[in-house]
Amino acid sequence: MSHYEEDNSGKILLAVIAGAGAGIIAGLLMAPDKGKETRNKLGSAATKYSGQLGDQLSKYGEDLDSKFKGYIEKLEDMGLTGAGGSLKLKGNWDDLKGKLKQQYAQLTDEDLTYAEGKSDELVGRLQTKLGKAKNEVVKMLNDL
């Protein structure tokens, strides 16, 4: 910027603030209802639309979560990520345990002890006993 050019940003900001203030004042003066009634109407409209917005956000969140999990599974199947980042056991654990014992005779009941929330311990025991990597064990369990 040369010495002779003016900086108009301050003037523009002042004009925007003045315009917004004039709009607020005009809106208040021309409101068809008294202030309290207008605030009540605004409050009830806000409550109504916030509920609808919350429902929509919840729906989109569930949809996004579902799509994200699907993409992760596809990436795992393609071998682009570590397979089975998390253990997702489907079905009755006793049935799954029976299948594992049929496939791997060296596994004992103690090796296959599973407690909810302690899947890392199960995966660790199976890694040691089967000599497989964590991602292989998790994928094997998820595929059962």
Image (spheres, rainbow, N blue to C red):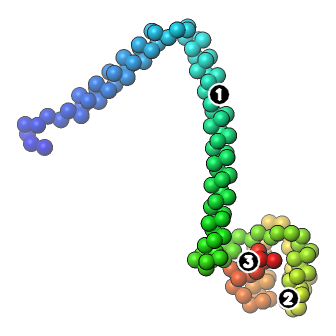
User: Is 118 on the left-hand or right-hand side of 79?
Assistant: right
Q: Determine which of the numbered discs, if any, sits on residue 103 in the image.
A: 2
Left or right: 56 in relation to 32: right
Q: Is residue 9 left or right of residue 35?
A: left
From the viewer's side, name the closer residue of 35 and 67: 67
Quadrant housing residue 102: bottom right
The secondary structure type at the circle numbered 3 is helix
Say what amino acid the circle numbered 2 marks: Gln
Q: CA distance from mark 2 to mark 3?
A: 15 Å
Dot 3 crowding, Cα within 10 Å, few <14, some 14–19, many 20+:
many
Q: Nearer the viewer, residue 69 or 82?
A: 69
Residue occupying image coordinates x 91% and y 75%: 95
Q: Is residue 25 above or below residue 114?
A: above
* Image location of residue 93, percent across then percent down: 88, 72
Disc 3: which residue: 138
In the displayed structure, 142 sits above or below 8; it is: below
Indicate which disc, 1 or 3, sits on the residue closer to the N terminus.
Answer: 1
What's the residue type where badge 1 is placed? Thr
- Figure check: 13 above or below 102: above
Q: What residue is pinned by disc 1?
A: 47
| 117 on left or right of 86 | right
- Please identify the quarter of the rendering in which residue 12 is found: top left
- Residue drawn at 89 percent across, 70 percent down: 92
Residue 16 position in % (x across, y down): 32, 26
Q: Is residue 24 visible?
A: yes
Q: Earlier in the sequence, mark 2 or mark 1?
A: 1
Counting residues from the start of the chain, the first of labels 2 and 3 encountered is 2
Q: Amino acid at mark 3?
A: Val
Check if mark 2's residue and mark 3's residue have beta carbons within 8 Å. no
Q: Secondary structure at mark 2?
A: helix
